[in-house]
Amino acid sequence: DAKTTQPPSMDCAEGRAANLPCNHSTISGNEYVYWYRQIHSQGPQYIIHGLKNNETNEMASLIITEDRKSSTLILPHATLRDTAVYYCIVRAWGTSGSRLTFGEGTQLTVNP
Amino acid sequence: NAGVTQTPKFQVLKTGQSMTLQCAQDMNHNSMYWYRQDPGMGLRLIYYSASEGTTDKGEVPNGYNVSRLNKREFSLRLESAAPSQTSVYFCASSEADRANYGYTFGSGTRLTVV
């Protein structure tokens, strides 16, 4: 699975959009981009995933560049409860032997 | 609530003691996983079970054994605990071991080996 690069930390004001970048320049055509978050040592929580089209759900939006080498997770109106470590993970589709591999993620701090 | 249940939530062991961490899911998922997380680090895969009756090693399997007891339950055993195994252990499940299925995680077991 392709390696990802994320900034170690980011800050965001409450009520503003939080834009978390992820670089995955070696991504292959059959690899999904996944985002999880982990709030204060709880179990990681699934946020969203996508292959090449932009995706939106009740939690967030995922924007994937046309060349698929980077993506951005957008939390449209960040709240204090969104303070967490956010993990960007790429994972191959169509193979039975592909597990989630976590890096160190981005610590997002939402400030009042 | 449906999900992944881990027991115990906290445990302190002496070096050389053994114990089993329990994990059960009620979502009828086929695949289950054990991860460990050391302070300030991401999760690392210990063992996984792609389907009932199968288990495979992950990134850091040494010092651990697993049992997929049935479709619901996947246990992790430490035969002779060492201080290096002090960590938070997370169990997860997935509908299938394929990339288009996400994982659901339990709340973790915090293990300290002294």
Image: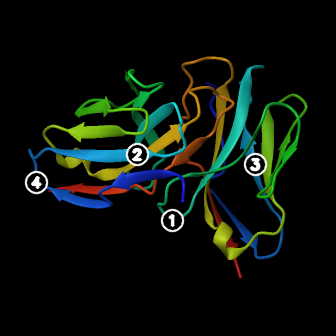
How far apart, in angstroms, are the residues tagged by discs 2 and 1? 23 Å
Give coordinates of residue A108: x percent, y percent.
65, 63
Q: Chain of mark 4?
A: B
- Mark 3, mark 2: which one is toward the viewer? 2
Q: State the image coordinates of residue A2 (x, y, percent, origin top left).
A: 64, 26
- Pointer 3 residue: A21
Q: Looking at the rendered structure, which numbered label has been put on residue B24?
A: 2
- Left or right of B102? Residue A58 is right
Identified at 87% across, 28% down, the residue is: A67
Please identify, in this view, whether the residue under mark 2 or under mark 4 is nearer the observer: 2
Chain containing the residue with disc 2:
B
Residue type (three-letter) at the residue carrying disc 3: Pro
- Which chain's residue wears label 3? A
Q: Residues within 10 Å of mark 3 (few under 14, many from 20)?
A: some
Label 3 residue SS:
strand
Look at the image and tell me whether residue B62 can be seen.
yes
The residue where tag 1 is placed is A40
Which amino acid, by three-letter code, is at mark 1? His
What's the distance in space between the residues labelled 1 and 3, CA to CA? 21 Å
Across and down, in percent, residue B99 comes to 65, 28
Q: Nearer the viewer, mark 3 or mark 4?
A: 4
User: Which of the 4 image quarters holds residue A33?
Assistant: top right
Crowding near the residue tagged with mark 4, few <14, some 14–19, many ≥20 C-alpha atoms within 10 Å: few
